[in-house]
Amino acid sequence: KVINKILKAHEEGRPYWSFEYFPPKTQQGVQNLYDRMERMYRLGPEFIDVTWNAGGTSSQLTSEIVATAQSVYGLETVMHLTCTNMPKEKIDKALKDAKECGCQNILALRGDPPRGQEHWEACENGFSHAIDLVRYIRQQYGDYFGIAVAGYCEGHVDNPDKDDDLYRLKEKVDAGADFIITQVFYDVDLFLKWVKKCRAIGISCPIIPGILPIQNYSGFNRIITLSKTIVPQFVLEELEPIKDDDAAVKEYGIKLATDMIRKMFADGIKGYHFYTMNLERSTRIILETLEFVPPVENVKPLPWCPSLSAKRK
Ligand code: FAD
């Protein structure tokens, strides 16, 4: 289980990291994703995770990718699972499929509203909040699954009361969640303060910050506008003169994420969750620059770990 690996890393006082992927739209895209997962496996993620499409349109594909990653490649995999348009029967099927393929880790989420819908609504015979899903998984499966939940250092957009939002997070942990992965953020001071607040109200489980290296200016702008992410003034100022130069923005994204991790590491944060956007280069360079991994050309496949493609054949 992921939680055991994370606790071990904490015990050993070493850094660890994980990679998030999303289900691609085409069959070729899925193939490319498997190839990328294989290459990125050399970067030693403690676990990987696969997102769940709000509304469930590509949820079968999530289950398939999870099954391949977990049972064919042997990657410790976390399956995201949301409540959006998921009556209990569908939740049951998703959990059963996950268990059958050997996946022991669920990121339990409420989910975003489906595309085109502004507010989130519970479906008939479904759940209203992530905590309901956490409770249900514990009730149905006991300790079989390790459970992660989402945390928001800027507060979740639907809850204007930040203290209440933090209390809701504590409730999820008290209901049985093992660790927390955060939403994207760019203000490290704010994150570190929020972690201290979590600790002060008794949230003691591992909290893993979500890192999204900026890949291009328009994508970055879309994400921060949609999720109303706070961006420090210096980042906006440094991006402004290079915003039309895609290569320069990408390099800046690498430098910014590397600096953010250095600052968090100095403050005792050990684990980092990369929103890879199914891309490899930025994450790899960040890990190499931090010297968390040696330059990748020097990394030999582990002798006890046959090439993933060999396993796939
Ligand atoms: P909840 O914990 O249910 O919280 C939602 C809101 O309700 C918050 O404002 C909270 O304060 C409030 N609240 C919580 N409990 C209660 C209660 N009992 N009573 C009243 N109010 C309450 N979305 C996807 O669709 N697919 C994904 O794969 C996905 N992956 C994600 C991965 C990470 C690491 C993160 C951080 C987010 C991810 N999301 C994903 C987005 C997430 O689904 C949305 O942010 C969603 O709006 C909230 O989900 P949640 O699990 O935090 O909800």
Image (spheres, rainbow, N blue to C red):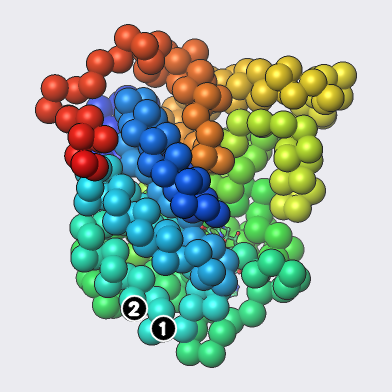
> What secondary structure is marked by label 2?
helix
Camera-side residue: 32 or 87? 32
Q: Residue at x 38, y 41 (%)?
A: 34
Return the x and y of residue 10 as percentages of the image width and height.
Answer: 31, 34
Instruction: Judge whether 177 appears above or below 121 on screen.
Output: above
Within-10-Å neighbours for mark 2: few <14, some 14–19, many 20+:
some
Q: Quadrant of the C terminus?
A: top left
Within-10-Å neighbours for mark 1: few <14, some 14–19, many 20+:
some
Return the x and y of residue 307 as percentages of the image width and height.
Answer: 22, 30
Camera-side residue: 247 or 16? 247
Q: Is residue 7 visible?
A: no
Q: Residue at x 49, y 29 (%)?
A: 280
Q: Are marks 1 and 2 in contact (CB under 8 Å)?
A: yes
The residue that disc 2 covers is 92
Camera-side residue: 56 or 213? 56
Tell me where residue 301 sits by quadrant: top left
Return the x and y of residue 186 as percentages of the image width and height.
Answer: 67, 35
**In the image, is 11 to the left or to the right of 248?**
left
Q: CA distance from mark 1 to mark 2?
A: 6 Å
Instruction: Judge whether 173 appears above or below 261 on screen.
Output: below
Q: Residue at x 34, y 33 (%)?
A: 38
**In the image, is 108 to the left or to the right of 10?**
right
Residue 88: give its label.
Answer: 1
Tell me if the residue at label 1 has its CB under 8 Å from ligand 1.
Answer: no
Return the x and y of residue 196 as percentages of the image width and height.
Answer: 53, 41
Tell me where residue 295 sits by quadrant: top left
Instruction: Judge whether 55 appears above or below 223 on screen.
Output: below
Tell me the amino acid under the disc marked 2: Asp
**In the image, is 136 to the left or to the right of 192?**
left
Q: Quadrant of ligand 1?
A: bottom right
Instruction: Judge whether 192 appears above or below 237 on screen.
Output: below
Tell me where residue 232 sits by quadrant: top right
